[in-house]
DNA sequence: AACCCATAATTACAGATGTAATCGATAAAT
DNA sequence: ATTTATCGATTACATCTGTAATTATGGGTT
C-alpha cells in the first residue's frame, strides 16, 4: 500500500522552473532521498547544467537557501505530475526521475525553438552570434558537431 | 488622464506562454488595436515564429479560437507587467511591444541554455543532432553562420 | 433625449505555483 | 515505556494563469 499506484504512462505535465531545480538535483544521482535532494540544492550548488557553469552570465542567485518543507512540497507535486517516482525503503522514500535529463533537454529545446524560431535551430545560434555571445569554444564545438553530422549523413 | 502613468524602466516580468502568443501577434505589426490583435490570433494563424512553420513537430493546436475577452485580459496583464505599452487614439488604445522580438528571443534562449545546458550553445545543437532533428538546411545555415563568425573574429 | 454598441475597466473563479506550517505515524533515544 | 526526533501527508495561503463574464462609459443611431 502506498507504493506506486498510477505510475503508468503519465506523459509529463509541464514542470515549473522551481520544480525543475529540484528535478535537476535528482538527476545528479538517484535514487535520492528527500534529504539528499535538499542537501544538494543547498550545499552542492554546482548543479544546474550539464557542463560546469564557468561562464554563465552574471545575475546568478545561486546562494538561495531552500527550505526543506518547500522542497518536500515540490517533490510531492512532481510525483503527482508523474515527473518523478519513488520506491519505499523502510519508511524512507527514494526518488528517481521518470524522465531522463537528456529527454527533458530535447523536449524543452524543441519547444522553445518551435515557439520562438519557427522550428529552426540556426536562428537561435545566429542570435547568439549577433550578440557576441558566441565564444570560440562554442564555434569549435559546433564545427566538430557539423563534421560529425556530415560524416553520418553523407 | 489614463495615459501612461508608470511606463518607466520596468524590467519585464516574465510573461507566460499564453501571453507570449498575444505578444507575438503584436510584434507582427504595431501599434495594433485590441481588435487587430484578436483578428491576427484567430485568422492570420501563420504567426508564431520568425520563419514559416513548415516542419514544426506534430501535435499543433493552431486552430484554437481566442475569445476576445480572454485576449483583452492578456493584453491588460501585459500592460501591467510592462511588456507592452499603449497610446490612446480617441477612445481606442493602440498597443506596442516594449521589448522587441529579437531581444526577447535572445533573453529566452540565453535563459534556457543557461538553465539546461550550463550556458553553452553547442550541447543544445548536439541534442538535436543526436535525435535526427538536424536537417541539411540547419547544417548549411550553421556553417554559413560559422564562416561569418570566423570572418568577424579572425 | 433615449437607446444601442463598441471598447475599456472591473470582477470572477478554478487551477497552478511559490513558499511554508502543521499533523500524524514511526523510529530512535532516554 | 515515554519522550523526542524524523519524515511523509495534509493543509495554508497569497499570487499568477487561463479563461471569461459583467459593468461602465463615451459615441453613434433613431
Image (spheres, coloured by chain):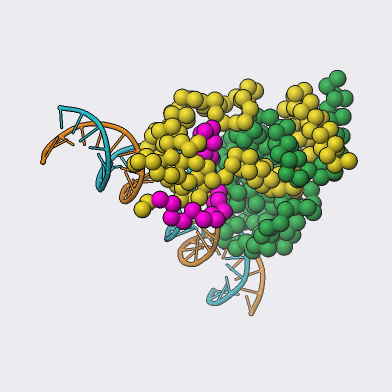
Chain colours: A green, B yellow, C orange, D cyan
Residue A12, image x, y percentages? 59, 38
In this rendering, position of residue A15 left or right of residue A100 = left
Classify residue B66 by image quadrant.
top left
Q: Which region is colored magenta? A: B3-29
Residue B91, image x, y percentages? 34, 41
Q: Is residue A42 above or below residue B98?
A: below
Q: Can residue A7 be seen here?
A: no
Q: Pick whichever, A37 or A85, lies toward us.
A: A37
Residue B22, image x, y percentages? 49, 37
Q: Is residue D4 above or below residue A133?
A: below
Q: Quadrant of the C terminus of chain A?
A: top right
In this rendering, position of residue A72 left or right of residue B154 = left
Q: Pick whichever, A59 or B98, lies toward us.
A: B98
Q: How many discs appear? A: 0
Q: Is residue B141 above or below residue A52?
A: above
Q: Is residue C1 above or below residue C23?
A: above
Residue at image position (48%, 46%) is: B85
Q: Can residue B81 be seen here?
A: yes
Q: Residue furthest top?
A: A154
Residue B50, image x, y percentages? 62, 31
Residue at image position (77%, 23%) is: B136
Residue at image position (69%, 45%) is: B110
Amino acid at each position: 500500500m502506498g507504493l506506486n499506484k498510477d505510475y503508468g504512462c503519465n506523459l509529463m505535465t509541464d514542470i515549473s522552473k522551481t520544480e525543475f531545480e529540484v528535478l535537476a538535483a535528482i538527476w545528479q544521482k538517484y535514487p535520492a532521498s528527500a534529504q539528499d535532494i535538499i542537501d544538494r540544492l543547498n550545499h552542492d550548488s554546482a548543479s544546474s547544467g550539464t557542463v560546469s557553469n564557468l561562464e554563465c552570465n552574471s545575475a546568478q542567485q545561486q546562494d538561495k537557501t531552500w527550505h526543506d518543507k518547500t522542497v518536500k512540497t515540490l517533490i510531492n507535486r512532481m510525483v503527482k505530475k508523474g515527473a518523478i517516482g519513488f520506491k519505499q525503503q523502510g519508511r524512507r522514500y527514494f526518488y528517481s526521475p521518470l524522465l531522463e535529463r537528456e529527454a527533458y533537454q530535447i523536449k524543452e529545446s524543441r519547444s522553445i525553438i518551435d515557439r520562438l524560431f519557427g522550428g529552426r535551430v540556426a536562428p537561435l545560434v545566429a542570435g547568439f552570434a549577433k550578440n557576441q555571445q558566441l565564444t570560440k569554444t562554442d564555434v569549435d564545438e559546433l564545427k566538430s558537431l557539423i563534421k560529425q553530422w556530415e560524416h553520418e549523413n553523407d
